[in-house]
Image (spheres, rainbow, N blue to C red):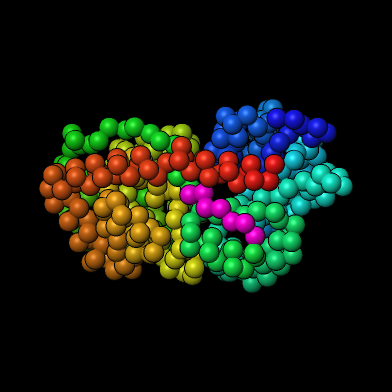
């Protein structure tokens, strides 16, 4: 493509570490494969700097609050200045300010820089923001004042797209947060001597993690739980497991690189995600971990919220439950694993679903949204 005075076609900025931000790295791969010159700029969560032609990870030592954002902007904005692009993608709400600064700096007369806002969440409903009133008011103001500079919006499902399109009157494309198409074996020969439930993702509030441990108290001893991920609740969950004398049945795998998550999950039997209804952000969620369960050929048990329920029912891949009802969840676990034939049928349905719900399909929607602005 012709670059003109721009060094890049597309620059993606995220407030997270691209090593663990699957969405930004999938965007980058899709753009490069399609012949665009593109780069991702994000943070390095381990403090080590990384600068490559197509990826920059700036070390940010602060872990949160004002100090994090101050350091994030100080490190990221100069990196963006070195990479002028025709299109800038703000990978989240917190990346909008530097994206807008970059747009103003490099827009020239009849050739304005285009800005895409990847609104992966309904941020005004995000529990972590709502819990802190000052932060909530500040970021709500940032989003509302920034939207006039945005040319197009991306989001993760149709329910959220309908809300955002009605609110902002901007072209809004749905790009689901799905994994690459992978081919782990259908678990015909999995042992059922022990049955592992797997949770994947950050160990944070609002995800029903305490209930997952409580669930083991009403299930037979052969049922065990694996947490694939890490986060602020880990110590608290470890103490809970110890107090209930479940420490031998609760396993903390820790954080796993993007490329290894599906294979790690395939070692378990059931993918379980009991998102709590703390507001629209969670109620309308369609998390990438849900799709990773499907890609790993794990039958699922998830909250009975509309977007996840729609997919579970469409492909017949598991059960939806009231995330607060331990007895209902336990019944679903026992029903799903009552015999190997029932389990295998659901696993085969997951394989069929994975052939539809994968990045090879969704990346074409992403590329179309980008090309519409070229």
Relative height, residue 253 to residue 126 (above, below): above
Quadrant the N terminus occupies: top right
Quadrant the C terminus occupies: top right
Q: Residue at x 67, y 58 (%)?
A: 65
Relative height, residue 66 to residue 262 (above, below): below
Please state which of residues 336 and 75 is positioned toward the viewer in this rendering: 336
Q: Residue at x 35, y 41 (%)?
A: 354
* Magenta span of residues: 170-176
Asked if residue 149 shows in the view, the reply is: yes
Q: Residue at x 75, y 30 (%)?
A: 2
Q: Position of residue 116 (x, y in %)?
A: 66, 50
Q: Position of residue 219 (x, y in %)?
A: 20, 57
Q: Position of residue 337 (x, y in %)?
A: 18, 50
Q: Is residue 144 magenta?
A: no
Q: Where, by quadrant of the figure, is residue 326 drawn? A: bottom left
Asked if residue 20 shows in the view, the reply is: no
- Position of 131 compared to 143: left or right? left
Q: Residue at x 71, y 36 (%)?
A: 9
Q: Position of residue 172 (x, y in %)?
A: 59, 56
């Amino acid at each position: 493509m012709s670059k003109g005075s721009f060094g890049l076609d597309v620059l993606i900025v995220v407030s997270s570490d691209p090593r663990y931000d699957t969405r930004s790295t999938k965007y980058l791969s899709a753009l490069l494969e399609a012949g665009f010159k593109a780069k991702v700029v994000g943070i390095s969560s381990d403090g080590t700097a990384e600068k490559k032609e197509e990826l920059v990870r700036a070390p940010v030592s602060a872990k949160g609050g004002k100090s994090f954002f101050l350091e994030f902007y100080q490190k990221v904005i100069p990196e963006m200045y070195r990479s002028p692009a025709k299109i800038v993608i703000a990978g989240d709400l917190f990346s909008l300010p530097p994206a807008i600064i970059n747009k103003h700096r490099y827009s020239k007369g009849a050739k304005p820089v285009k800005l895409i806002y990847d609104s992966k969440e309904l941020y005004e409903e995000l529990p972590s923001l709502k819990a802190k009133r000052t932060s909530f008011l500040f970021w709500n103001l940032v989003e509302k004042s920034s939207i006039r500079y945005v040319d197009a919006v991306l989001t993760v499902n149709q329910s959220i797209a309908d809300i955002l399109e009605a609110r902002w009157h901007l072209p809004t494309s749905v790009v689901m947060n799905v994994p690459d198409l992978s081919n782990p074996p259908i678990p015909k020969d999995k042992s059922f001597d022990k049955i592992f439930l797997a949770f994947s993702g950050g160990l944070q509030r609002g995800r029903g993690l305490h209930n997952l441990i409580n669930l083991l108290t009403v299930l037979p001893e052969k049922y065990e739980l694996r947490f694939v991920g890490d986060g602020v609740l880990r110590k608290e969950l470890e103490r809970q497991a110890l107090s209930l004398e479940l420490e031998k049945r609760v396993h903390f795998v820790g954080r796993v690189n993007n490329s290894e998550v599906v294979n790690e999950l395939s070692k378990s039997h059931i993918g379980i995600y009991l998102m709590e209804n703390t507001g629209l952000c969670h109620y309308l969620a369609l998390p990438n971990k849900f799709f990773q369960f499907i890609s790993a050929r794990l039958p699922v048990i998830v909250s009975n919220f509309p977007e996840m329920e729609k997919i579970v029912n469409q492909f017949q891949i598991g059960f939806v439950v009231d995330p607060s009802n331990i007895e209902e969840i336990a019944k679903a676990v026992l029903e799903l694993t009552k015999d190997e034939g029932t389990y295998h049928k659901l696993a085969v349905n997951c394989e069929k679903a994975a052939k539809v719900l994968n990045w090879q399909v969704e990346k074409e929607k992403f590329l179309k949204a980008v090309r519409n602005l070229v």
